[in-house]
Amino acid sequence: MRDRKDADVHVLVTTERNSSGGEDFLIEYIGLGRFQGQTRALRQASAGTDTSDERRRGFARTFGLGLVPFLFGSQTLERLHLAYDVPIEEQNVPPTSASAAQDPWNLWIYRAGLSVNLEGERANTGSGVRGNFSANRTTDVWKLSFGGNGDYNQDTFTLSDGRTINSLSRSWIVRTLGVRSLGSNHWAAAARASIGASSFENRDLAIRSAAGIEYSFFPYSESTRRSLFAQYTLGINKLVYDQVTVFDKLQEIVYDQNFQATLALRQPWGSTRVSVEGASYLHDLALHRMEVEGRLDVRLFRGFSLNVNGNASRVRDQLYLPKGAATDEEILLRLRRLQTGYRYALSVGFNYQFGSIFNNVVNPRFDGF
């Protein structure tokens, strides 16, 4: 339906990524009209190894079960049948002991990926390699992760006068993170470390370690519907540059601090997220960065929804910029980060649907035409 007020039951679905790489669905049933005041909620979890069909079937099963209480007292309930599918591993198998049922992986989830791409036409060719790996373990008290990724891309362009321009970019990073609950549903502490390099940001080597603390104004258990948290971190960085920087440095050790506050709401009327961040280097507070970003997706009236995304930042912390002006090729091909005092982006859109609320026919013919 185009408007939630036309329905007897409004189903609000929110999702969060879980530690296995899958998704946790929170399905909330909000009674309207003759069901006013009736609310229920169910959860459905998918694993990172589930196929899209398995996720769809699991979600549809849970979704349907949540609607059953709204059928009480109706003739439709008489046509409802209940069945239980015995898992294959439980069929004709005696109960297992507690020790046999223990997780041999001790809650660790591992992932690895590698992709290679090649493309070309008469005037240009390109190739690239991308790889990643990760190991994660999440409990109610601890969140541990270790991972990394790398990219290598090369392109060749042939100009109209026969000249060729080569574009090469590469980056890699390995990082680890440990987060611990501080015995409540509001406080957490974290420590992280990373090592990497980036040709785009003139970094031959960047080593960083940091520690921080976070306070959640709402309980973490409510994060699928609302969250408001504040973070503060302190870090130390060892930086080795490929070219001499605008500050006449080839390497340096610097300390930094970062503060971030984020509000996220997911409600029947829509969703919104607003984040404010500030960071600076401790040896010179004039070297800082401030950023605000937001997203709004709201239904204003029947069939009409508004979408707004934007961000703006004040940039004064580009320690890594190489001395000297960038060439035209570096600018056009985005081979290096350019000096700037600000960045911004804004997109605004709307969707409006009107017409029949009774047409729910599915006809997939010529969908891709």
Image: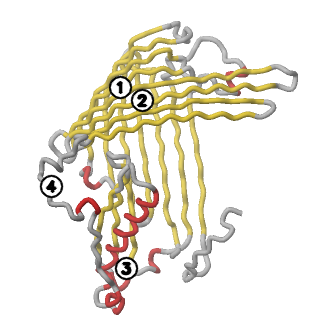
Residue 50 location, x and y as percent?
40, 54
Which is more foreground, mark 2 or mark 1? 2
Q: Quadrant of residue 14?
A: bottom left
Cα separation, mark 4 vs mark 1, equals: 52 Å
The answer for how far apart the CA atoms under marks 2 and 4 are is 38 Å
Is 303 located above or below residue 179 in the figure? Answer: below
CB contact under 8 Å: marks 2 and 1? no
Asked whether the residues under the numbered discs 2 and 3 touch, taking CB atoms below 8 Å apart as contact, a structural biologist would say no
Can you identify the residue that label 3 sits on?
Answer: 32
| Amino acid type of the residue tagged 3 in the rendering | Leu
Nearer mark to the viewer, of 2 and 3: 2
Which of pointers 2 and 4 indicates the residue nearer the eye?
Answer: 4
| Residue reaching furthest to the front | 92
Mark drawn on residue 96: 4
Q: Mark 2 or mark 1: name the one nearer the start of the chain.
A: 2
Q: Which residue is mark 2?
A: 148
Q: Residue at x 46, y 12 (%)?
A: 240
Q: In terms of depth relative to the viewer, which is nearer, 252 or 90?
A: 90
Q: Pick whichever of labels 2 and 3 is earlier in the sequence.
A: 3
Quadrant in the rendering for residue 278: top left
Q: Label 4 neighbourhood size at 10 Å, few (<14), some (14-19), many (20+)?
A: few
Q: Nearer the viewer, mark 3 or mark 1?
A: 3
- Find disc 1 in the rendering and name its residue: 257
In the picture, the disc for residue 206 is: none
Q: In terms of sequence position, does the residue under pointer 4 or pointer 3 come before the other?
A: 3
Drawn side of residue 128 relative to residue 291, left or right: right
Q: Amino acid at mark 2?
A: Gly
Residue 270, above or below 35: above
Kindly indicate the quadrant of the structure image that contains residue 107. Answer: top left
Real-space Cα distance between discs 4 and 3?
A: 46 Å
Q: Is residue 162 found left or right of 233 in the rendered image?
A: right
